[in-house]
Image (cartoon, rainbow, N blue to C red):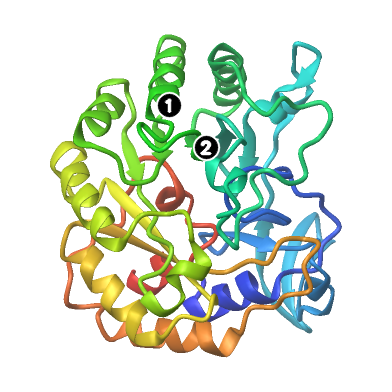
Amino acid sequence: MLDYRTKLELLVLGVRASMTPLRRGGGGPVGGIGFAVKDSIVSAPTVQEFAKESPYAIVEGEGGFWLYRGEEKIGRVKLPVARYYDYRIKGISAGRFAALDGVNALVTAVTRRCIHVESGKKCVFCVIEENVPETLILDKAPEDIAEAVKVAYEEDRSRHLTLTTGTPNLVDKGALRYAEVAEKIRAEIDIPIHAQIEPVGREYLELLYSSGIDTLGIHVETFDERIRKAVVPGKPEIDAYLESWENAVDIFGEWNVSSWIIVGLGESIESMVSGFKAMAERGIYPYIAPYRPPPNSAEKTDLNHVLRVYEALKELKGEYDIKLKFRAGCPRCTGCSAILELLS
């Protein structure tokens, strides 16, 4: 496994490579390539301008691909294969309905419409409504998603699925659509399913569980109250997350619910530590991930700040018995965070 500092450098500085990202848009960080090296999975920015200056590069030679840092050979690289992208659904590549991210993570945005974008309260890091190709509809039919996922899963049965969505309304926040999609998929194949949603009422969490969703992500994004209104202006207060987390853990079980905290948005280290504790104390998997600027941005994430945050979290390593096994979703993929490498 990579040491956590090396992985953080890859996540923040990016990697020079000739490969094209398999996932072009949707929820979550974009503009990166996924690969495995030394038993770690990495999703590293590669199309961003800053990545062109990265000391890391993937180089072909000796019968394969290798990760280098400068002249130092770090390890052999395993690249994902997505032959199912050649399969067509209504004349469109199946990869548009369910993309391959990391190495074995299937990802689909059920809808790329978001009420927070429409109201002028878009999250500062979100690109879900950007880079929509002409060949992809904003709202995917559940049966089309199920067909794509089935083809992708049957190509490589080690894969798991993450359902993302823009927030379509302020009541069920996408839970009803998720349940419909999950039921369609469950009728076809038995694949581990993860869904990501804002805090919702307990009845919707129970619906998600009964529809066949295995794990849940309820992403607080930042615990720093100084920047929260600027970073996620349309999202609920932190108290709503605490309540929804407790309900979700009661339904899905400890360490089957996760939350992203993004590093590099102007937050304090103290807020990162307190947020980590708040999650770990409740059985929430703390997915701590550096901010990845979108491809067309001139932004850069401060590597030194990210390293200081992880050094502070390292001090908490022995305080919580965090279960690092996750059936589906970001904590199983592990590509965008070095928390697995830190805590292992």
Q: Is residue 131 above or below residue 264?
A: above
In the displayed image of the protein, which residue is found farthest to the front?
Answer: 119
Q: Residue at x 40, y 53 (%)?
A: 331
Task: Pick the residue in front: 83 or 78.
Answer: 83
Disc 1: CA contacts within 10 A as few (<14), some (14-19) or many (>=20): many
**Residue 207 visible, this orientation:** yes
Q: Amino acid at mark 2?
A: Thr
Quarter residue 247 falls in: top left
From the image, tell me which residue sits under label 2. 165
Q: Amino acid at mark 1?
A: Tyr
The disc label shown at residue 328, or none: none
**Residue 1 visible, this orientation:** no
Quick check: 66 left or right of 42? right
Q: Residue at x 44, y 16 (%)?
A: 189
Real-space Cα distance between discs 2 and 1? 9 Å
Question: Where is the C terminus found, in terms of image quarters?
Answer: bottom left
User: Label 1's element?
Assistant: helix
Percent across and percent down for residue 216 are 34, 42
Quick check: 274 left or right of 133? left
Tag 2 near tag 1, CB within 8 Å: yes
Task: Pick the residue in front: 67 or 219.
Answer: 219
Percent across and percent down for residue 230 are 52, 69
From the image, tell me which residue sits under label 1. 178
Q: Earlier in the sequence, mark 2 or mark 1?
A: 2
Percent across and percent down for residue 162 are 48, 38
| Count of numbered circles in the view | 2
